[in-house]
């Protein structure tokens, strides 16, 4: 073949890729748009419609993420930290079958029971999953489609006001959140995957005009506030129950820590100075050879990063992402602050000093829209610091939901009065000091899996997740 022929073929491939990417952008804008009616206001047909729409949105996102690559790529393990994408796909269907068809619907298993074991996350660590006799991509797609057909049929007929599992559609909403959480995990796998880019989305807009004039931190007054929830019908067990917590006055950053700020820490020798690190963090920093956030590299005096297969200059005004808890903790000490506790984070997000009540979202109780937060994979990166003034909390804190998950100082522990529901392995098996809590949700989190009470947790060394942070400081005597 002549060089021209090869070039023409390469151009053709580029064109097809460009068309696919464009199609994904349109898909990301249109079908990932969530419904806006508050969950608590839904009953009867409206509730069923909302659940069906949320199930559909999750499935379109799953399809977008799994159709973007070919079969060998679906079967490959892109990092030992992650499952092959085809495992996530069939696991999504298997959990849907187990909870909705078998438990709620009382149906018989659709496949031999060995299949349940293959997709049980507790039986097989991620590193081992590529060696399992998994369903192939075609069989996985067929399975999730067949399960979904039966689930939509069940949703039409099942009572949604009976036992706790189905009350207000909880089990269906739990399965929506489960699928969206795996979609976020698959998005993280895409970020780790090497090779040409296959995902695309428009960049978020520039920071609003007032961003540069925002105070660097705001004071949250001391006193009691209500943490957690007892009445959000789709909240998960670890968010329950609502309980009063006394939180002394504190300062919290108005926006998440940016790439520019983090680069100053790096350039100030932050990674080489044990003073800023707690002993376990320093040991990990040395052993893992950490020198900058994951996916960053320095060339010609400029920080570059790899983002979904593209290399680009690190944008200075964007919240930093892909840092582990130890890095966040060290930065905070270097900057003269500390990470907020989980209670402080939630108070900054929910507490309304005028009414004394706790809101469902920082801006109030209205469902998230594109004016409130960077959620739902509409963009494939955080928005500039100071974005989304309409999403600010009563205290004036911005970007608490969306953009990046925010590490907190706290371990993952049950609230007083916690009861495991619907199963121990959802949260209870993870309680303890091994995991640190993250709050807020990143750009890859769907609104269906995002509330100001939502709690995420991970090991303090993890940074392939979309994790950033903001700092807090104690208030001085007499402040707040
Ligand atoms: Fe799962």
Image (spheres, grey):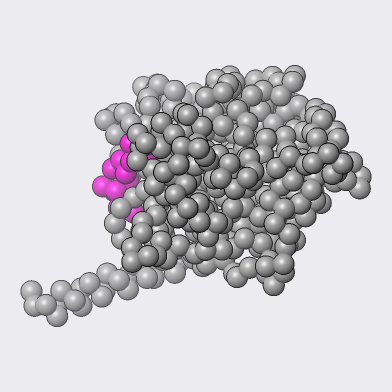
Q: Main secondary structure of the magenta part?
A: loop
Vertical arrangement, residue 460 with respect to residue 267, above or below:
above
* Residue at x 49% of width, y 64% of height: 315
76 within the magenta span = yes
- Camera-nearest residue between 304 and 187: 304
Location of residue 84 in the rendering, given as x and y in whole percent from the top left corner: 34, 40
Counting every numbered tag in the picture gives 0
* Residue at x 52% of width, y 24% of height: 434
Report the residue that reaches farthest toward the right: 355
Report the residue that reaches farthest toward the bottom: 4
Magenta stretch, residue numbers: 69-82
- Camera-nearest residue between 252 and 205: 252
Vertical arrangement, residue 456 with respect to residue 363, above or below:
above
Location of residue 24 in the rendering, given as x and y in whole percent from the top left corner: 46, 63
Vertical arrangement, residue 144 with respect to residue 305, above or below:
above
- Camera-nearest residue between 313 and 241: 313
328 within the magenta span = no
Which image quarter is the N terminus in? bottom left
Picture quadrant of residue 143: top left
Report the residue that reaches farthest toward the left: 1
* Residue at x 40% of width, y 58% of height: 305
Location of residue 188 in the rendering, given as x and y in whole percent from the top left corner: 44, 47
Residue 238 in view (yes/no):
yes
Location of residue 40 in the rendering, given as x and y in whole percent from the top left corner: 79, 42
- Camera-nearest residue between 349 and 155: 349
Residue 142 in view (yes/no):
no
């Amino acid at each position: 073949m002549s060089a021209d022929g090869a070039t023409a073929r390469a151009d053709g491939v580029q064109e097809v890729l460009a068309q696919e990417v464009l199609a994904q952008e349109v898909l990301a804008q249109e079908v990932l748009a969530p419904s806006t009616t508050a969950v608590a206001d839904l009953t009867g047909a409206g509730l069923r419609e909302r659940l069906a729409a949320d199930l559909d949105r999750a499935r379109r996102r799953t399809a977008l993420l799994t159709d973007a690559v070919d079969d060998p790529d679906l079967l490959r393990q892109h990092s030992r930290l992650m499952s092959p994408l085809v495992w996530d796909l069939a696991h999504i269907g298997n959990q849907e079958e187990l909870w909705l068809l078998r438990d709620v619907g009382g149906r018989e298993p659709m496949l031999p029971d060995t299949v349940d074991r293959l997709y049980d996350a507790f039986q097989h660590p991620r590193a081992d999953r590529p060696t399992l006799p998994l369903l192939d991509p075609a069989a996985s797609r067929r399975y999730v489609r067949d399960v979904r057909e039966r689930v939509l049929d069940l949703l039409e007929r099942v009572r949604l006001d009976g036992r706790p599992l189905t009350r207000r559609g909880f089990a269906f909403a739990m399965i929506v959140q489960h699928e969206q959480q795996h979609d976020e995990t698959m998005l993280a796998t895409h970020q780790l995957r090497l090779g040409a880019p296959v995902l695309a989305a428009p960049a978020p807009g520039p920071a609003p005009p007032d961003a540069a004039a925002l105070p660097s931190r705001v004071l949250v007054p001391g006193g009691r506030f209500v943490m957690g929830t007892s009445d959000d019908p789709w909240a998960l067990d670890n968010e329950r129950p609502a309980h009063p917590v006394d939180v002394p006055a504190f300062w919290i950053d108005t926006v998440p820590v940016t790439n520019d700020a983090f680069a100053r820490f790096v350039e100030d020798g932050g990674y080489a100075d044990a003073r800023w690190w707690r002993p376990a963090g320093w040991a990990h920093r040395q052993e893992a050879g950490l020198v900058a956030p994951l996916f960053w590299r320095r060339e010609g005096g400029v920080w570059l990063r790899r983002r979904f297969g593209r290399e680009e200059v690190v944008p200075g005004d964007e919240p930093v992402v892909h840092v582990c808890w130890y890095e966040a903790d060290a930065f905070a000490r270097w900057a003269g602050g500390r990470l907020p506790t989980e209670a402080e984070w939630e108070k900054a997000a929910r507490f309304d000093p005028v009414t004394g009540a706790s809101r469902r979202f920082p801006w109030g109780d209205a469902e998230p829209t594109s004016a409130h937060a960077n959620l739902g994979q509409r963009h494939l990166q955080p928005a500039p610091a100071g974005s989304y003034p309409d999403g600010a909390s009563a205290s004036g804190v911005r970007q608490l939901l969306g953009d990046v998950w925010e590490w907190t100082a706290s371990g993952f522990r049950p609230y007083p009065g916690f009861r495991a529901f619907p199963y121990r392995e959802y949260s209870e098996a993870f309680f303890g000091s091994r995991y640190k809590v993250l709050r807020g949700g990143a750009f890859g989190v769907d609104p269906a899996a995002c509330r100001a009470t939502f709690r995420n947790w991970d090991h303090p060394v993890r940074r392939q997740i979309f994790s950033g942070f903001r700092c807090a400081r104690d208030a001085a005597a007499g402040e707040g």
